[in-house]
Amino acid sequence: MAEHNPIIPREAIDRSFALKGPKQYTLWIDIEHCIGCNACTVACKAENNTPVGVDYTRVIEIEEGDFRDASKTPNVSVTFVPMPCMHCGRPACQAACPVGAITKRKEDGIVLINKDKCIGCRYCAWACPYGAPQFNAEARVMEKCTLCVHRVEKGLLPACVTTCPAKVRFFGELNELTTLMHGKRARSISISVAGADTKPSVQYTTTR
Amino acid sequence: MNAIVKIRAESPVQVESSLCARFRCTKSQCAACAIVCPVPGTVRFVEQGVEITEACVACGACASACPNGALRPLEGDRRLAERIRDRVRPAAAFRIACTRAKGRADIVLPCLSRLTEAIVLEPIRGGAARVEFLDPGCSGCGLKKAAPQWKKVLMFSRNICESAGFGVDRVARVSVPSGKPEEPRGRSASPNPRRAMFHAIAERWKASGASVPQEGEPKQTPAELFRDVVQRHHENPKRSDLLEILPSLPGAKLRSKVISAAGTPLADLEVDRHCVGCNVCETLCPVGALRHREEKGTYALEFDSALCTGCRVCEAACFYQAIHVRETVDLSVLFERPRVTLISAPRRTCQACGGTYLDGSSEFCSLCQVSGSRRDAVARRFFSGGITK
């Protein structure tokens, strides 16, 4: 089964699931080893059955360097940054929603949109610094990454995590993951866009 | 029979959630009912807006305070107005008392804070010379927390009188010693109170639209989704009563009367250029005071100022902070009912996302412009020393 992962042992995941009380499930994404294959995007679409144009997780390509300057040796690189919902500690989308359709669950820290309440005003898409909420034009409601809450509640891992061929996405409780991260990968970063202090929970690591 | 008993045992105040500002917009700070409720712990804020618990003493202050008419006492405004209509004597003062006021009164209420503007103006419509509030002084009363509400209604009624060209003293407060009020029996009162009581139960039973529960499986009706509920706009009974009374006030000569909008169940709105035409204000407005119109690619937002109750849901909900409540409001809108166009601008379609927005210099909607720059911000974060240990 694809759940076998050389970096994160199954026991660590089980420990995350077994934790009682308020916790924060999250993802740890190793952008140093991401190959940008978009398998997570496809797996997510298949799992959540999202229509065209609605992607809960995307991969951003960041190119740097220059090869046109003949006097220097070409120094170009491309980095892939998968962008799921950050399941923020202080979600900007929740603060923007006029009808209270977005909630952050205390028991596992997952930020969810209640589609029965959502009026499709797109305020959350405007407020989110990471572009996570997506507008479903067919149903006229907003949708976003749920951290595969239907799978997690059954003790399974999110679809993107089990699918990732390069094994760069890890799922677990935030504190458990941080401990592991310090053992396996030295540097960790957490994206936060200037001017939006939303306390994103998703962790990125790189060896740079 | 059980169902009848159940109606009797219901809370004395019914809540029509779809008119409640808190239910429609969780950002709404409206707490009008909780502020005036004299019994602590009676009004609870829940997901369905508000809930009236069993501690309720049926004073009716919350129903008077709620600008949108979401709270309805068992003796509704219309039935109370009917009772008043029966007792009005033309060209005489109409005296309204609470249960602690000493003196002869035309009608006795549990508390003066039950009154609304429409009820106060009802005797004037019936030809009464004056409406007098018999005030025994609220400081010694258990319901004194509700006192500011009736004073507010008194002020608002006086302002309406002034706007209608009457003297302000048409509605006045009269200090009386505390004691027991004497209430005349209404002309239409039944000689048999027992029969009247059963008639009242039967009427309430009919009005509730309930049916005798059948033995067997209980019927399960699927709950309506919130987003479908907010698409409907219920009539605000308080405001429609007031608007019905105003044109029929005898001898009214309309005058402009500008008052401060703070604490008044009336407001004037303005919309600035930040509006993108998202229609959230229209959807969430509990009383349907805002309506949009789209013609030949032009978006127009229309405002019926006579329906606006100043609950500030639109102001709280607007993400772009484009809609504002003006500081003053002219009471003559209640008589004239003008339809104001708040904003009118050509609608444009975004080249990137296909969404619509209002006139701007760019070919892309502001959301797409911002998400592009945000993506850049993420990239910069990774590659310009933004990496932190």
Image: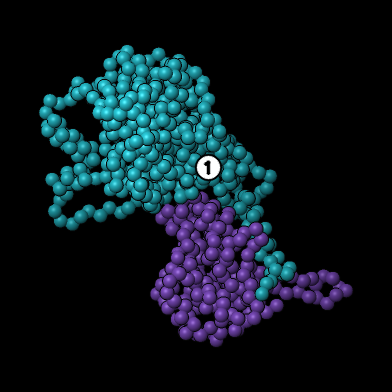
Chain colours: A purple, B cyan
* Residue A12 rendering spot, x and y as whole percentages: 49, 82
| Image side of residue A100 versus residue B50, left or right | right
In x, y percent, where is residue B25? Answer: 46, 47
Judge whether B323 appears above or below A130 on screen.
Answer: above
- Please, what secondary structure does the residue beneath circle 1 have? helix
Residue farthest right in this picture:
A71
Quadrant of the rendered structure where residue B124 is?
top left
On-image quarter of the N terminus of chain B:
top left
Residue B302: in sight, yes or no? no
- In-front residue for pair A16/A115: A16
> Image point 28% across, 26% down: which residue?
B102
Foreground pick, B193 / B67? B193
Disc 1 residue type (three-letter): Glu
Is B211 located above or below residue B239 in the figure?
below
Residue occupying image coordinates x 68% and y 62%: B376
Q: Residue furthest bottom?
A: A6
Residue denoted by label 1: B315
Residue B368 versus residue B160: which sits nearer the camera? Answer: B160
> From what the image shows, is residue B72 above or below residue B214?
above
Q: Is residue A14 visible?
A: yes
Nearer the observer, A73 or B4: B4
Residue at the image point whose x is 50% and y is 29% from the top: B339
Please report, as a chain letter, where disc 1 is located: B
User: On the rendered structure, is B86 left or right of B118?
Assistant: left
Q: Residue at x 57, y 55 (%)?
A: A127
Mark 1 neighbour class, 10 Å CA radius: few under 14, some 14 to 19, many 20 or more: many
